[in-house]
Image (cartoon, rainbow, N blue to C red):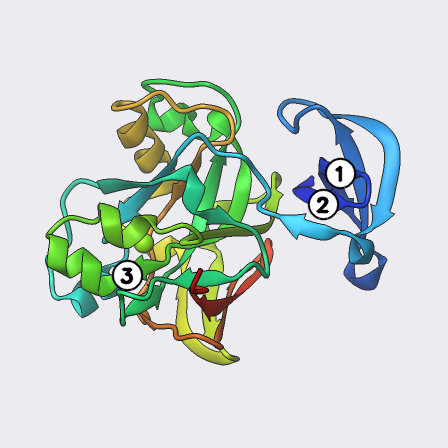
Amino acid sequence: MRLGRIASPDGVAFVSIEGDGDERIAKEIAEHPFGTPTFTGRSWPLADVRLLAPILASKVICIGKNYAAHVAEMGGEAPEDPVIFLKPNTSIIGPNAAIVLPPNSNNVHYEGELAVVIGRPCKDVPAAKALDVVLGYTVANDVTARDHQRHDGQWTRGKSYDTFCPLGPWIETQLDPSDLEITTELDGEVKQHSRTSLLLHDIPKIIEWISAVMTLLPGDVILTGTPEGVGPIVAGQTVSVTIEGIGTLSNPAAPKKVQ
Ligand code: MG
């Protein structure tokens, strides 16, 4: 199933997206998208509604340095264990929403990533059972003020600005995430191109590692790390991340409006 969240003339709703191309229909889900959804009977052509971030997360947990070639370009060593950090849920935006560039940063980077969406409350999940707690997979951009990340010596400020976690366009629930092509384009030029089979720590290991620390709640999102080819995005440019079997997440970058 392809799960999304939309703004329609009738309000905000979780939906199942069915069909392909211009024929796509958004069918309204009653209540929430976890478990077996029930439907209200209302639907809209997808072209007539606006896609929002596909899920509401209590937290976004990210893996750093999880592709060897990205570790190399950043000039570090590949960590033996997963390195985790958080982005606040206030950083989440949906497809086509603007990444707002902080005026005090001159080096904001895109990072295309496969995102895991958690489907049930869980703690201490063994790797062998990790995929049981997954609702599905979506596309993420771990936008980063690289200058702030380097200046501070830790990552919270550089990773946490409002709009720094684009998610979407929807969640694919039936997908094997172990070997998917991932591509990031900046104004149509390919900047990142890799496969999720190159993750140093795979998704079951990541879920085991994170859930040993914190309780995961339905809708929580895990960003699995970015491949090599990160770089700056400036106002007026559009970054598009495409993952095989899911789709494309596009977001323009815009300067912060002066109040
Ligand atoms: Mg990242």
Instruction: Give percent across and percent down for residue 186.
Output: 46, 76
Instruction: Give percent across and percent down for residue 82.
Output: 22, 41
Q: Residues within 10 Å of mark 1 (few under 14, many from 20)?
A: few
In the displayed structure, 201 sits above or below 28; it is below
- Which image quarter is the N terminus in? top right
Q: Which mark is residue 11?
A: 1
Type of the residue with mark 1: Gly
Type of the residue with mark 2: Ala
Between the C-alphas of marks 3 and 2, the distance is 29 Å
Instruction: Give percent across and percent down for residue 61.
Output: 34, 38
User: Quadrant location of residue 96?
Assistant: bottom right
In the displayed structure, 32 sits above or below 256; it is above
Q: Residue at x 56, y 38 (%)?
A: 55
Residues marked 3 and 2 touching at CB (< 8 Å): no
Q: Earlier in the sequence, mark 3 or mark 1?
A: 1
In the displayed structure, 227 sits above or below 223; it is below
Residues marked 1 and 2 touching at CB (< 8 Å): yes
Q: Which residue position holds label 2?
A: 7
Q: Say which of 116 and 235 sits in front.
A: 235
Instruction: Give percent across and percent down for residue 219.
Output: 51, 31
Between the C-alphas of marks 1 and 2, the distance is 6 Å
Q: Secondary structure at mark 1?
A: strand
Between the C-alphas of marks 3 and 1, the distance is 33 Å
Q: Does mark 2's beta carbon lie closer than 8 Å to ligand 1?
A: no
- Which image quarter is the C terminus in? bottom left
Residues marked 3 and 1 touching at CB (< 8 Å): no
Type of the residue with mark 3: Ala
Q: Which residue position holds label 3?
A: 145
